[in-house]
Amino acid sequence: MLCLPTSTIAFRPSFLLRPALSVRSLSLSASKTGPIFPATSPTAPSLTLYTKAGCSLCDQVVASLQAIRDGDSCDFDLAAVDITDAGNADFDDRYKFDIPVVHKDGVYFFKHRMPFEGDAEMMREAILENGGPVGQEPDARKMRMK
């Protein structure tokens, strides 16, 4: 058994030695911001997916949109905005509890799951024919803590 003099052993909990971390500084992977797929026409609708790393619902929305785009000859582009990136604090404050959130041509379109799930034709029409928002745009800043 190893015996050390008590003067050489110093108990210092590691949490006291580290600076406090914010949620935004705990990014576990690289940014998700960037193009997902481009449109072939400059007049095609533009969709923006507000997301963050580890969002499985976001992955499902991307897969559904890709299937609609490929299967129904529906031309639109899709880009992602990582709400946890530096400079995106406003999106994080608004959407942190509601991703995925999708905007169409800069205006809120839907959140959480694909609307018209299982009906690709209705979703295609909503994308191409100026379909309006589905539900109300989320805003976590308006939530009251009780």
Image: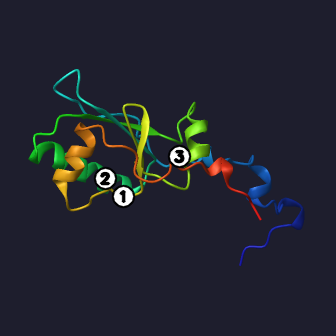
Rendering quarter of residue 84: top right
Residue 68, given in percent of the width and then of the height, sits at 17, 48
The amino acid type of the residue labelled 1 equals Arg
Residue 127, given in percent of the width and then of the height, sits at 26, 41
Residue furthest to the right in view is 7
| Residue in the foreground of this view, choosing between 27 and 79 | 79
**Label ID, residue 137:** none
- Give the labeled residue for mark 1: 113
Please tell me whether mark 3 sits on a helix, a strand or a loop.
Answer: loop
- Give the labeled residue for mark 3: 27
How many neighbours does mark 3 have within 10 angstroms: few (below 14), some (14-19), or many (20 or more)?
Answer: few
How many neighbours does mark 1 have within 10 angstroms: few (below 14), some (14-19), or many (20 or more)?
Answer: some
Q: Is 18 located above or below residue 48 in the figure? A: below
Cα–Cα span, label 2 and label 1:
7 Å
Q: Are marks 2 and 1 in contact (CB under 8 Å)?
A: yes
Q: Earlier in the sequence, mark 2 or mark 1?
A: 2
Cα–Cα span, label 3 and label 1:
24 Å
Residue 115: tell me if it is visible: yes
Q: Earlier in the sequence, mark 2 or mark 3?
A: 3
Judged by depth in the image, the label closer to the viewer, 3 or 1, is: 1
Please tell me whether mark 1 sits on a helix, a strand or a loop.
Answer: loop
The amino acid type of the residue labelled 3 equals Ser
Image quadrant holding the N terminus, namely bottom right
- Give the labeled residue for mark 2: 61
Judged by depth in the image, the label closer to the viewer, 2 or 1, is: 1
The amino acid type of the residue labelled 2 equals Val
How many neighbours does mark 2 have within 10 angstroms: few (below 14), some (14-19), or many (20 or more)?
Answer: many
Residue 86, given in percent of the width and then of the height, sits at 57, 33
Q: Is residue 141 left or right of residue 48?
A: right
